[in-house]
Amino acid sequence: MQEFIITFRETFEVALIAGIVLSFLKRTNQSRHNIIVYSGIGLAVAVSVVLALIINQVAGGFSGETEEIFEGVMMYLSVIFLSFMILWTIKHKHHVKEIEEHVADDLNANYKMGLFFLIFVAVLREGVETVLFLRGIIVAYEKSILAFSLLGIVAAVAIAWALFKGMVRFNMKKFFNISSTLLILFAAGLLAHGTHELQEAGVLPVMVEHLWDINPESITHPLHEKGVVGSVFKSLFGYNGNPSLLEILSYLAFLLVTLGWWWSYEQKQELKASVE
C-alpha cells in the first residue's frame, strides 16, 4: 500500500503538470514544442533511475553499525523530502495559471530551454522524493516494492490521461487532502523506524527501551505485529509492537508539527477568503 500510494501520488502530480503544459501548447497551436516536454520528462526519469541504482549500490557496501547509521539517515532524508513535498503541494495546490504563464513567457522570449527545465525540474523533484521514500520502505520493512510501485505509476498515468480527456471527474482537493494525510502517517512511521536504527547504532540515546511489548504475546492478539490489526498498522503506518520512548516521541512530534502547520495554513486561507 505504501509504495503504491507514493508512486501513484508522485506520478499523478507529474502527469498533471505535463498535462497542463501539453494542453496549453495544443490550445495555443504550439504543439511542435511537445518534444521538449517529453525530453524533459525522459531525462528526469533517467536521472532518477541512475540515482536509485547509485543509492542501492552504496547501501550494499555497508554492514553492521555503519549499515544501521546509513539506513537511519536514509529514512530521515526520506521524511524530510516527503514533508517538503506534502507541505509544498498543500500550499500551492497546482496553480494552473502560474504554470501556463511561465510556459507562455518562455516561449514568447524564444527561450525553449526554460520550458525544458520547467518540466525537467518538476519531474526530477518528484523522482528524487520517490527514490528516497521507496528506499526507506525497503530498509524499514524489508520487502519487495517493485510490483505495487509499477502499479501505482500505471494507475496514475491512466487516471490523469482519462481526466484530461474528460472521461473521468473527481474532487481534486479531496484527493490531495486524503493522499497527503496518508503520506504524513507513512512519513511518521518511517521517522520512527529511522530513530530505531540510529538507536541501535548508538547514535541516539535509548532512554526507555520499550514503552510496551506486545510481541511476546500470542499472534492471535490483535495488536501483535503479525496480528489482525497490528499487521495492517505495521504495513501502513510503521506500527511497532515494542517501541522505545524516543520512537513514540518522534512519531507524535512529527504528526503534531505537520498536521498543526496544515490546520493553521487552512485556517489562514479561510480567513483570507472571507475577508476578500
Image: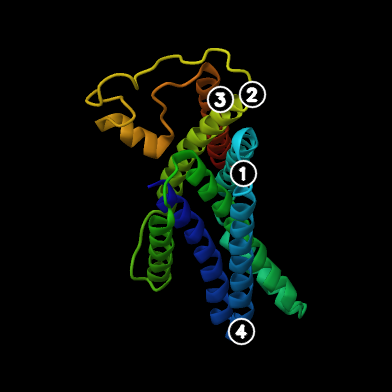
Quadrant, the C terminus:
top right
Q: Are marks 2 and 3 in contact (CB under 8 Å)?
A: no
Say if residue 123 shows up in the picture.
Answer: no
Tell me which numbered mark, 1 or 4, is placed earlier along the sequence: 4
Dot in front, 1 or 2:
2
Tell me which numbered mark, 1 or 2, is placed earlier along the sequence: 1
Residue matched to label 3: 250
How far across and how far down the image is residue 255, in percent?
Answer: 51, 29
Q: CA distance from mark 1 to mark 4?
A: 33 Å
Dot in front, 4 or 3:
3
Mark 4 nearby-residue class (10 Å; few <14, some 14–19, many ≥20): few
Residue matched to label 4: 30
Residue type at the position of mark 2: Gly
Tell me which numbered mark, 4 or 3, is placed earlier along the sequence: 4
Residue type at the position of mark 4: Gln
Tell me which numbered mark, 4 or 2, is placed earlier along the sequence: 4
Is the residue 235 above or below the residue 122 in the image? Answer: above
Quarter-of-image position of residue 53 = bottom right
Q: Is residue 8 left or right of residue 207?
A: left
Q: Which mark is residue 202?
A: 2
Residue matched to label 1: 84
Say if residue 57 shows up in the picture.
Answer: yes
Mark 3 nearby-residue class (10 Å; few <14, some 14–19, many ≥20): some
Q: Are marks 1 and 4 in contact (CB under 8 Å)?
A: no
